[in-house]
Image: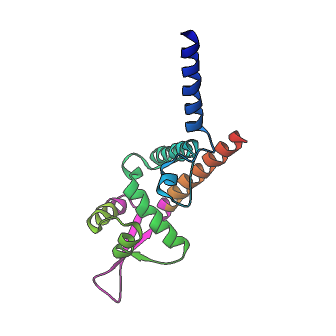
Amino acid sequence: MKQDILEEARRALEVLNQYFDDSSESSSSALRGDPVSLSIRQMRELARSHLRSGLLRKEVLGAELSSEYCWMILMALYLSRCDASRMCVTDIVYSTGIPAATVIRWLTLLSSRGLVARSPDRNDARRTWIVLGDTAVTLIEKCLTMEASENLQGKAAKS
């Protein structure tokens, strides 16, 4: 009887080891046939990293501005600034996939906080250009730097 229990426990342990093995192909991406297949541990680390990124954003930007939609809008505007280009509301909508009304609401809040500036298009009165303010750039770069630092520390700890 005791031998049967030990044998059952060994089999259960083997199943668990296979499930959590780094080389495991049992992730949902592998099941869907996606080109990138991640192990359960890799998925878990990716989820932890995403969660930490959100917490870092909350620490730097505050609870309200750390929302995913707000961050996506800020990232679109930041990339636009890096490319030395301008964006209007429609550009932000297309680049983020966020509904126009939601983008406008977030831009109103960001504008009221002095993080973005609006300027009318001289050629088209229906369009307004949106640009990041220097304060927003500083906050975004602080978030990105902290996230990069966390990721590097995590990789160094695994080595």
Q: Where is residue 125 drawn, in percent x and y?
A: 29, 85
Q: Does residue 78 belong to the magenta stretch?
A: no
**Could you tell whether 23 is left or right of 19 in the image?**
right
Is residue 113 visible to us here?
A: yes
- Residue at the top extreme of this rendering: 1
In the rendered view, how is the structure colored?
Answer: rainbow
* Above/below status of 4 relative to 154: above
Q: Nearer the viewer, residue 4 or 146?
A: 4
Q: Residue at point 51% right, 62% down?
A: 137
Can residue 115 be seen at all in this image of the molecule? no
Q: Which residues are magenta?
A: 109-136
Q: How many marks?
A: 0
Query: Is 97 rendered above or below residue 48?
Result: below
Q: Is residue 12 left or right of residue 68?
A: right
54 and 31: which is toward the camera: 31
Q: Quadrant of residue 87 in the image?
A: bottom left
Q: Is residue 124 above or below residue 111?
A: below
Residue 42 x/y as whole percent: 58, 45
Where does the C terminus fall, quadrant-wise?
top right
Residue 79 on image: x %, y %? 51, 69
Residue at 55 percent of width and 21 percent of height: 9
The residue lying at 42 percent from left, 61 percent from top is 72
On screen, residue 136 versus residue 149, left or right, reads left
Q: Residue furthest right?
A: 159
In x, y percent, where is residue 97?
36, 66
Between 85 and 26, the residue placed more toward the observer is 26
Q: Could you say which quadrant of the image residue 8 lies in?
A: top right
Check if residue 122 falls in the magenta segment. yes
